[in-house]
Image (cartoon, rainbow, N blue to C red):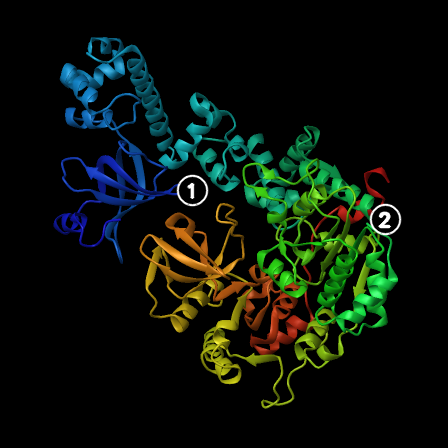
Amino acid sequence: MLTSRSPLSLYMESDTSFSSLTGTVVQTIFSSPKDDFGVIALLPDGKQRTVICRGSLGHLGKGELVKVTGEWTKHPRFGQQLEIKSWNLCSPSSGAGLERFLGSGLVPGIGPALASRIVQHFGDETLDILQNQPTRLKAVRGLGAKKREALISFWQERDASSQFLLKISEHGIGMTFGMKIQKAYGVDAEKVLQQNPYRMIQDIPGFGFTTVDRLALKMGMEPNSSHRLQAGLLHTLNEAKEQGHCHLPRLDVVHRAAQLLNQDNASLETQVDHLVESRSLIWVSEHLVLPGIYHMEQRVADKVLQRSSSSPITPFDPRRLARVIKESSVELSSSQESSLVEILGRGLSILTGGPGVGKTTMVRLMVRYWERLGFEPVLVAPTGRAAQRMEEACGRSASTLHRAMKYNPQKGFVHKEGHPLEGKVFICDEFSMVDLELFEAFLEALPSRAQVVLVGDRDQLPSVGPGRVLGDLLDSKTIPAAHLKEVFRQAGGSLLVQNSHRLIAGKKLLQPDSKDDLKDFYFIEARDENHTLQIIKKLILERFPQRFGSDAQAGAQVLSPIKKGPLGTIELNHQLQNWLNPNGSEIHVGDQIFRVGDRVVQKVNNYDLELYNGDLGRVVGGDENSALVRFGEREVHYEQDAMRDLGLSYALTVHKSQGSEYPYIILPLSRSHRIMLHLELLYTAMTRARKMCVWVGQKDFLEELTTQPSRIERHTFLGSWLKQGGTRG
């Protein structure tokens, strides 16, 4: 990477007036395989020094001749660069340029020497020969038939590509999108755009409805076209799926699509009928469902009912259980003992309950019971943090569901029907986080003879993906379930535990009797959002260290319902980074600044690095191109591309924190968050704390939230299928 003392910076100091350049790509410095972001070194025509360009460059390769337009920016480490706003391919305009282009390696078998021979042979006619008289290339010495055909084919394809890209650019479609379209459809690209551009939503990764609709309308698609209306209706249901729904009422779908497309309901009703007739949608009980998720709910219901009626892997042994309880030196209530008996005697069962009721103790006892019988329970959870907590509690290895089933992003899960997991007993913790798709994969990966226990708290946030699986299983009353309700005596004095249960019951939360009364839950009143931010700063920098010691800062986790806004995670992370780590060596990744010492979170699954969404680490080293991040006992080297999947973790969304626990939780509450503050979110945030939870906000708003809570509603059919006995019921 060039530094601020490179020839580039010297060149830029003498000439910074232009914002458009035509030149040759001489080096691809960085190219992301996940999107179009790239960094290239461009040699402008007539210049001796390269210019660094960055932006959505469509994976331009070495040797390409392009015209780029952008604005100059100054990178804090690498000096001035051209931030690309648009670009397009060009044809060489001079003999030297054409020679350099042909010899760049873009054409197989043609290097600089042969390229020079071609240009010298035809001189100023070379471009015309390539475009209009390619048969004359036979006259060039050393250009055999194979190389000649490769050159002709390359030039014709490039010419057709240029014509297509030029044509669609007239409609405001950029080169990056154009190249993706051409790559997907080849010579049929223009035909697809003219006939039904909405095909691209299914055919080209990353092309969503909003992008395609904008392109289609620019290309002249009628706003009331049947293709557009049907695509909008399907998009409405896919968007609902991303929000956790498995279906929507028909009237709701039509209403949402009408707003999206600015069309009348009657036209959309007609298109709904066409989609139902073509089996692109299923209409059942006045609801519309995408076929894939409709049949998935059916399959899951059938598999669950089949397993729920199966016998345990071995007959229940009450004497063995009694010995395990005695050896563990725990005192169980009668309800807890009966719950254990219920679970251990079933092929499939659920263990559920809130904080302080002993779920972890029960899981530990189950593990020891099965170990005494010679079985090795397989412990799994949806996230890495949840698996780590399970491992610590039970004293044996635990893993994420994805890792256990050996997920491959190209091929899916290795363990599935026909290639099941090894084991006889399976316990899945934090099951409220498991969505319909993951649950089906888990069911398919289980051996035909296995005992399964699902452990979770139904009052926590439901899964990010579609479904409310735990809630549906419990509400159907078709699966044996042990509900733990009695709070352990040692947890009974905890305001944190008491308020968790009061929140679910819709009761007013309890506060410490006085300022000197040391408790584990507090609400601190703030005048406004700025005051809230100042209170958070004082808590982390002063109050927590004074009460809990200097390590308290590292254990304090700020949560927020949202990412944007003054109290969203983006702004909070910026503030917290400056408060807690102002002087660490900086690492720049796009607009994000990391510092050595920062707390970070992995934002997406990276199967190559064996890192998963939600994994927490700390930056322990790095330079301008990479970072070294410690996750527990493991250190991972991140290149620039992989670092784009990292984020600061001083503040996390409540959703991102699910499955984890932290010593101290701070939750800012603002009326600007109101739409997100469902009961499940507040409850999940509260139950992430091990030692203390502090809410900060306006008092009247707190009372409104806790006495009139709203619950998350999800439309699913799984519960109905279970109640009626599955598809065979």
Residue type, label 2: Ser
Query: Regarding mark 2 in the picture, which secondary structure is present there?
Result: loop
Front residue of this view, candidates 180 and 148 = 148
Query: Regarding mark 1 in the picture, which secondary structure is present there?
Result: loop
Q: Earlier in the sequence, mark 2 or mark 1?
A: 1
247 with respect to 554 (left or right): right
Vertical relation: 237 (above or below) 89:
below
Whole-percent x and y of residue 603? Answer: 50, 54
* Mark 2 vs mark 1: in front: 2
Which label was assigned to residue 311? 2
532 with respect to 42 (left or right): right
Residue 671 visible in the picture: yes
Whole-percent x and y of residue 605? Answer: 52, 49
Whole-percent x and y of residue 57? Answer: 34, 39
Which label was assigned to residue 35? 1
Give the residue at x 65% y 48%.
466
Whole-percent x and y of residue 430? Answer: 67, 59
Residue 290 visible in the picture: no
Which label was assigned to residue 308? none
Front residue of this view, candidates 714 and 276 = 714
Residue type, label 1: Asp
Marks 2/1: CA–CA distance: 49 Å
Q: Quadrant of residue 707?
A: bottom right
Determine the residue located farthest toward the left in the rendered image: 14
Front residue of this view, candidates 346 and 263 = 346
Q: Quadrant of residue 619?
A: bottom left
